[in-house]
Image: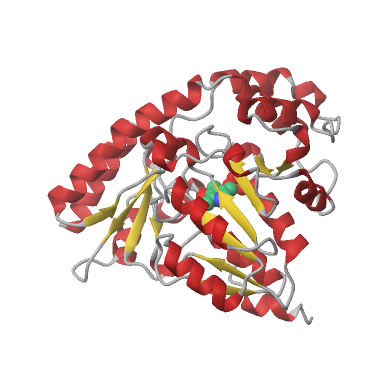
């Protein structure tokens, strides 16, 4: 069968390896497997959320409220924006898909950092669009503007904090990039890890409201990371009403599930769980910084729930990742991004202990 030509340009997205695979392939007991690969919340799900899932189990036969009125009202109150400014997706991934389908075609391009979230490229290629990268993985104003002037991309992606590197871009720097591009280019500010950056340093905090004055900017957020709801698949885009109205044309009906909707509404009510997650994270990530220093390799200062370890020629990230996997420790190798580096989601104290033990053994 002949498939669309664009498929030849797409590499299938490789998700973090599931625990089941390690159990099957290496015969390790599931309870001994530590997964620090997909930036999931290590303390799990808020008990109040689990309760909402149980108590709504008997409405699983009903389609969700397709207006998502209650969730939009909750998000609107949380971020001080109007309901007309919000679109909900099955993860912010789905909002990225709406954006790509609404704006891209063979004549267009996207501009993104040299190393950033892989889905920007995949959705762009699906539409036949070109992918332009800046020279470095940091979001540098000069690099973005130089590439913007040369290629006039339809979309600029600013992932702050950035995945998979963990660094962030200051709010003033992001606003400077936005101010320098004209209205025909959409600037997407992907804040999937914003809760962590805002808690670490206010200079990096960007709210959807900060951006709402720009007709050509959309902010993306998700319940998957700090809220610990990756498995429920809920994310959102916040932008001026005109832009949201266009994206709505790409949305299938009932695009999140009835239970996901209940859960996301509940998650907006209380920030205690997020605060608790961040507090644990801030305490545990210090151990990863100390560990790197003690073992003589570099890391990127992280504004996210993961840390990226950088190696020189003496160490090979693929060898280390494979050796760790055989020991039941799943982390993310960044070799496919052209970096001799590993991305490790910060776990619980116990998970991190196991990681340090195996990692020390592997590299010695
Ligand atoms: C996790 C992530 C997302 C979206 O995740 P969803 O689970 O689809 O909401 C978007 N952008 C970045 C950079 C991410 O790391």
Decide if residue 281 is on the left or right side of residue 44: left
| Viewer-closest of 308 and 175 | 175
Q: Residue at x 51, y 73 (%)?
A: 147
Seen in the picture, residue 58 relative to 196 is either above or below; the reply is above
**332 or 161: which is nearer to us?**
161
The picture quadrant where one finds residue 254 is top right
- The colour scheme used to paint the residues is secondary structure
Position of residue 208 in the picture relative to residue 146 (left or right): right
- Count of picture labels: 0
Residue shown at the point (53%, 22%) measured from the top left: 271
Residue 194, how many percent across, how many down?
49, 40
Q: Identify the image quadrant of the C terminus.
A: bottom left
Above or below — where is 30 with respect to 154? above
At a point 76% along the width and 78% down the height, the residue shown is 3
Q: Is residue 329 visible?
A: no
Q: Position of residue 344 (x, y in %)?
A: 36, 49
Q: Position of residue 119 (x, y in %)?
A: 59, 60
Image coordinates for residue 265, horizontal then vertical, percent:
68, 25
Q: Looking at the rendering, which quadrant does residue 349 occupy?
A: top left
Q: Is residue 81 visible?
A: yes
- Work out which quarter of the rendered image holds the N terminus and state it: bottom right
Image height of 123 relative to 76, above or below: below
Viewer-closest of 130 and 317:
130
């Amino acid at each position: 069968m002949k498939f669309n030509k664009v498929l030849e340009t797409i590499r299938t997205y490789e998700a973090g390896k599931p625990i089941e695979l390690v159990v099957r392939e290496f015969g390790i007991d599931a309870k001994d497997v530590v997964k620090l690969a997909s930036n999931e919340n290590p303390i799990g799900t808020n008990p109040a959320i689990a309760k909402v899932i149980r108590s709504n189990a008997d409405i699983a036969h009903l389609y969700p409220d397709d207006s998502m009125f209650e969730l939009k009202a909750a998000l609107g109150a949380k971020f001080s924006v109007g309901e007309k400014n919000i679109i909900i997706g099955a993860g912010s991934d789905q909002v990225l898909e709406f954006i790509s389908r609404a704006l891209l075609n063979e004549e267009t391009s996207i501009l993104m950092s040299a190393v950033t979230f892989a889905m920007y490229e995949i959705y762009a290629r699906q539409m036949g669009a070109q992918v332009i990268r800046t020279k470095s993985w940091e979001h540098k104003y000069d690099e973005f503007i130089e590439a913007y002037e040369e290629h006039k991309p339809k979309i600029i992606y600013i992932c702050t904090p950035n995945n998979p590197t963990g660094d962030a871009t200051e709010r003033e720097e992001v606003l400077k990039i936005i101010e320098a591009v004209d209205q025909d280019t959409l600037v997407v500010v992907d804040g999937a890890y914003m809760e962590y950056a805002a808690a670490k340093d206010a200079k990096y905090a960007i709210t959807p409201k900060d951006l709402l004055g720009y007709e050509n900017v959309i902010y993306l957020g998700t319940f998957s990371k700090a809220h610990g709801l990756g498995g429920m698949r809920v994310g959102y885009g916040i932008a001026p009403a005109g832009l949201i109205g266009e994206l709505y044309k790409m949305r299938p009906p009932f695009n999140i599930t009835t239970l996901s909707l209940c859960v996301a509404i509940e998650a907006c009510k209380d920030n205690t769980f997020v605060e608790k997650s961040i507090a644990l994270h801030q305490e545990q990530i210090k151990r990863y910084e100390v560990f790197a220093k003690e073992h003589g390799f570099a890391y990127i200062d992280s504004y996210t729930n993961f840390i990226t370890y950088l190696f020189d020629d003496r160490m090979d990230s693929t060898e280390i990742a494979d050796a760790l996997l055989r020991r039941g420790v799943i982390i993310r190798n960044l070799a496919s991004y052209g970096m001799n580096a590993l991305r490790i989601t910060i776990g619980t104290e116990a998970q991190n202990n196991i990681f340090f033990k195996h990692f020390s053994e592997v590299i010695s």
